[in-house]
Image: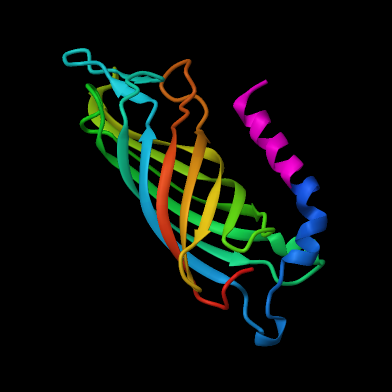
């Protein structure tokens, strides 16, 4: 079974097993007339799943050079307040990530960036710790050392539609500040050959909830 299928099954199981408790545990202040809004950022450490051979060959190889690289990530979450109570466990998330530093041989000029949006599902059974899963879709862009194509054109970047499957945990620090740690797995499809581009890694950061503290 592929990792993508496992992630989908995990999120479905988490939803079914916690829906009943989410109905009673998920509470928003409807009288305020405000959507739950939070924003955060952090550090991502990723395997970019991409490298280039040394010159003079200097060709790109998705799936090669699994050195760890790091970068920055930012996100915004808007909670769902309307509809049935179980739907309040969902949020709409927008995210931007750029991986640009570190790496092994063949990755010195590499930058991978993604921007996308989708849904998160948060288990709000406990007050201090809240596990979550997410699925986002968007655009991934990779920039690398220039390569000369047969046509004579310079080829140094490409982009693909991508999907992000992730999950992690949020920990309450104050009434409005939460720490966040997660693992993300991206699928970009085929790029420059037979291997699919599948960056993956961990993110640690913090976020600020602008409305009343979540329960």
In depth, the one of 174 and 192 nearer the eye is 174
Q: Is residue 39 above or below residue 13?
A: below
What residue do we see at 24% from left, 25% from top? 104
Relative side of 127 to 183, left or right: right
The answer to which of 139 and 176 lies nearer the viewer is 176
Please state the extent of the stretch shown in magenta in the rendering.
1-14
Quadrant (top left/top right/bottom left/bottom right) for the N terminus: top right
In the picture, measured across the screen, residue 174 lies left or right of residue 2, that is left
Q: Which residue is farthest top?
A: 57
Residue 93 on the magenta segment: no
Q: Quadrant of residue 24?
A: bottom right
Q: Position of residue 99 (x, y in %)?
A: 33, 41
**In the rendered image of this protein, does residue 62 appear above or below residue 69?**
above
- In terms of secondary structure, what is the magenta stretch mainly? helix
Q: Tell me, yes or no, whether the highlighted magenta stretch contains residue 13.
A: yes
The C terminus: image quadrant? bottom right
Q: Residue at (79%, 54%) from the top-left corner?
A: 19
Quadrant in the picture for residue 129:
bottom right
Residue sitting nearer the eye, 166 or 179: 179
Q: Residue at x 17, y 16 (%)?
A: 55
Q: Position of residue 148 (x, y in %)?
A: 24, 22
Q: Is residue 5 above or below residue 82?
A: above
Can you give x and y, in whole percent of width and height, for residue 25 in the image?
A: 74, 65
Residue 89 against residue 146 in the figure, above or below = below
Looking at this view, name the residue that lies furthest to the bottom: 31
Residue 193 percent coordinates (x, y): 43, 17
Q: Residue at x 62, y 75 (%)?
A: 35
């Amino acid at each position: 079974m592929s990792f993508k299928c496992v992630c989908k099954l995990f999120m479905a199981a988490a939803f079914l097993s916690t829906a009943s408790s989410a109905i009673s545990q998920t509470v928003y202040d409807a009288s305020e007339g405000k959507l739950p809004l939070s924003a955060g950022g952090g550090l991502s450490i990723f395997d970019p799943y991409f490298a280039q051979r040394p010159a003079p060959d200097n060709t790109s190889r998705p799936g090669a050079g699994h050195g760890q690289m790091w970068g920055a990530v930012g996100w915004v979450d808007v909670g769902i307040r309307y509809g049935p109570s179980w739907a309040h466990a969902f949020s709409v998330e927008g995210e931007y990530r750029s991986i640009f530093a570190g790496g092994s041989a063949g990755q010195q000029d590499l930058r991978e960036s993604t921007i996308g949006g989708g849904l998160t599902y948060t288990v709000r059974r406990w007050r201090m710790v809240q596990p979550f899963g997410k699925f986002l879709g968007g655009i991934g862009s990779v920039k690398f050392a220039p390569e000369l194509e047969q046509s004579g054109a310079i080829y140094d970047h490409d982009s693909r539609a991508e999907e992000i499957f992730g999950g992690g945990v949020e920990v309450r620090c104050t009434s409005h500040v939460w720490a966040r740690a997660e693992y993300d797995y991206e699928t970009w499809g085929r790029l420059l050959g037979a291997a699919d581009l599948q960056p993956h890694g961990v993110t640690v950061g913090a976020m600020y909830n602008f409305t009343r503290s979540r329960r």
